[in-house]
Image (cartoon, rainbow, N blue to C red):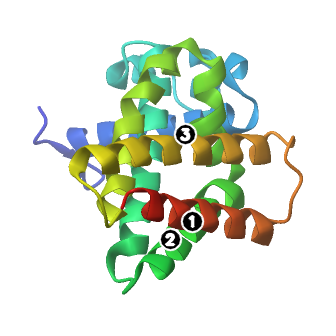
Amino acid sequence: MPGRTWAGTTLDDRKALRREQLVAAGLELLGTEGSAATSVRAVCRHAKLTERYFYESFADREELVAAVYEHVGEQARRALVDAVQDAPNPTLRAENAVRAFVELIVDDPRRGRILLLAPLTDPALTRRGLHLLPVFTAVVGEQLSGGDETERQLVAVGLVGALSNVFVAYLDGSLKVTRERLVAHCVKLVLGADDLSR
């Protein structure tokens, strides 16, 4: 019965907690060791839970990987929305958004690898990555100040693509610049996109 309690928690509470443990374990493995290391057995071992509890929350490995990806995607979306919420002008909005995103994916590189690199290597995420792109495109498009809706959408799609490639290159080590230069360049891209949308 879901309503019964044990040690002060309900069955639903314990299920939710176990699910959180599994997602956290998936985030750690996928974000540090990569797709091949993120098996059901490895996730259960890392979470210190049996496979029985894994299948209580997820149908299979792909469902867990998707949940981890969507969890990190929501963190990124929230960080961007919060960053631009009270900024009084386009320059400050661009700086706040870029800094918030860089903090999210560079200060905890696991999140950057999951959001930007894992969809390139994990078949379970290939379609999911394309699914999340419109979410980020919409957030960016809302910040553009000129042009009609179609023009803003065109510019937002191009900007998200450009920024994604810059961040992927930074995370995989092929782009060797300081963090401040990365931020400054991305802010220029965002401000240039705002001009393009007019």
Percent x, y for residue 169?
A: 77, 41
Q: Residue at x 71, y 21 (%)?
A: 37
Q: Residue at x 60, y 48 (%)?
A: 163
Q: Residue at x 69, y 46 (%)?
A: 166
- Asked if labels 1 and 3 touch by Cβ distance under 8 angstroms, the answer is no
For residue 55, say whether it is visible.
yes
In front of the other: label 1 or label 2? 2
How far apart are the alpha carbons under marks 1 and 2?
Answer: 6 Å
Kindly identify which numbered label has been placed on residue 98: 1
* Image position of 179 (left or right of 7): right
Kindly identify which numbered label has been placed on residue 94: 2
The three-letter code of the residue at mark 1 reads Val
How far apart are the alpha carbons under marks 3 and 2?
Answer: 16 Å
Kindly identify which numbered label has been placed on residue 130: none
Residue topped by disc 3: 161
Quadrant where the C terminus is found in the figure: bottom left
Badge 1 element: helix
